[in-house]
Amino acid sequence: MEAAPALLDIRGLRQSFPRADGGEHLVLDGVELALQQGQIVGLLGRTGSGKSTLLRLIAGLAQPSGGTVTYLGQPVLAPAPGIAMVFQSFALFPWLTVLENVQLGLEALGLPEPEIRKRALAAIDLIGLDGYESAFPRELSGGMRQRVGFARALVVHPNILLMDEPFSALDVLTAETLRTDFLELWGEGKLPIKGVILVTHNIEEAVLMCDRILLFSTNPGRIISEIAVDLKQPRNRLDPQFRDLVEKIYVAMTARKTSPQPIGTTGEKTATIDTVLPRVSANLLSGLIETLAAAPFSGKADLPVLADELALELDELFPVSESLQLLHFAEIEGGDIKLTDPGKQFAELGMDDRKKLFARQLLAYVPLAAHVRRVLAERANHVAPKSRFLDELEDHMSTEDAEATLRAVTAWGRFAEVYAYDDDSGTFSLENPT
């Protein structure tokens, strides 16, 4: 007996956008994905890995630079009627009631008025909002507004539901309730959908909800690993198998090798001048060092345990921990983070001595910071405009990454007092450093 054809089949997908210098910024490269009926597939990765862009391509809201997106055997060249999306933001029309917001998709299909009302009321009831049909979005909590978003997507009876971080804007308890309700409805076959693709930054959420998890690299986004989740629903976060799988994903995301330019989850500690730096404040770096140095960690922590302890998601914990690794204040290996000798020393010093140690590490291991300092030192007036360095960075990365990288190295340099920056004039100088 032949296997049922895939609901969705993606082959060699590539997406790029033009850059100001005439080059291109590659967002997705060589993505291969198939969604079978009855599956929830998770897309897990950092910001900048192109996951949301991929959802837009699947939905037909944009066209790829290369490769194909096939839905039920047909190429997706425009918005497909059998594919619906739930967004991170609630995206409701504030002047419309719950019922009117849910009816919008059906009105676009040109269905008869009685059918529109019947299906909208059924979707509202299904998602647990019966009694709120006449309420406006401003009268609802965040969780209830996201339920309206789910009802609006489900009311058109899609075959595929795309979910772009649908729980990330909610508080922890509300998100947990909505996830549980969704999984119960899915497991009981009450949802009019055949397959789901979920974009998330939350590793535990991915393990809790998905049948398969695809790990994405960044700059550009590529699928670097696929992990099957062979755990029966409902899943228990305290189950040893659940914890083992979370640990396995952390290890995979910290051990992998990606493009040499961005730091992050690569296991590499050496940067270049054109390395994309995350925007992480010195206060966050100091805070994580102090946390790791204190009990119960005493210098070393398992990343999943640390994430639970600090209530941090992947996109919050990884940039800080990887910045510590870049500065050689910590090492990341096998899903663990361990303070180096300079990291332990930093935790014990007062503020002035911390700044001196930070300056030493910054100039030794972040070439861009050393480059800024060297340019300033060589100029007679010890001043250089921001554009001097921004233009240089834009030769190697997108404008957005260049701005973020320069902001990061500016903040670190200010903290270490290796150079100063005046935002009003947009100039770096050696005015303040000793």
Image (cartoon, grey):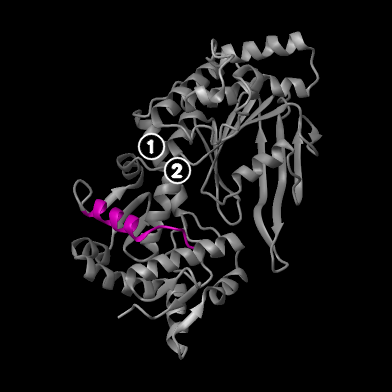
Residue 220: assigned label: none
Which stretch is magenta?
277-293
Q: Position of residue 76 (x, y in %)?
A: 78, 37
Q: Is residue 194 visible?
A: no
Q: Would residue 319 appear left or right of 258 to someone viewing this image? A: left
Q: Amino acid at mark 1?
A: Asp
Classify 159 as above or below 218: above
Instruction: Residue 151: tell me if it is visible.
Output: yes
Q: According to the image, label 2 marks what residue? A: 249
Magenta highlight on residue 356: no
Q: Which mark is residue 244?
A: 1
In depth, the one of 404 and 431 nearer the eye is: 431
Quarter of the figure with the C terminus:
bottom left
**Residue at 38% in and 51% down:** 334
Assign the N terminus to one quadrant of the image. Answer: top right
Precedes in sequence: disc 2 or disc 1: 1
Dominant secondary structure of the residues highlighted in magenta in the image:
helix
User: From mark 2 to mark 1, how far is it between C-alphas?
Assistant: 9 Å
Q: Residue at x 69, y 24 (%)?
A: 159
Residue 108's quadrant in the figure?
Answer: top right
Mark 1, other Cα within 10 Å: few <14 / some 14–19 / many ≥20: few
x and y, in percent, of residue 60 in the image: 74, 38
Residue 81 vertical position relative to residue 278 in the rendered view, above or below: above
Residue 280 x %, y %: 41, 57
Percent position of residue 274, x then y: 54, 70
Q: Amino acid at mark 2?
A: Ile
User: Does the magenta run of residues contain 284?
Assistant: yes
The secondary structure type at the circle numbered 2 is helix
Query: 330 above or below 365?
Result: above
Callout 2 touching callout 1 (CB < 8 Å): no
Q: Residue at x 34, y 61 (%)?
A: 282
Q: Nearer the viewer, residue 4 or 147?
A: 147
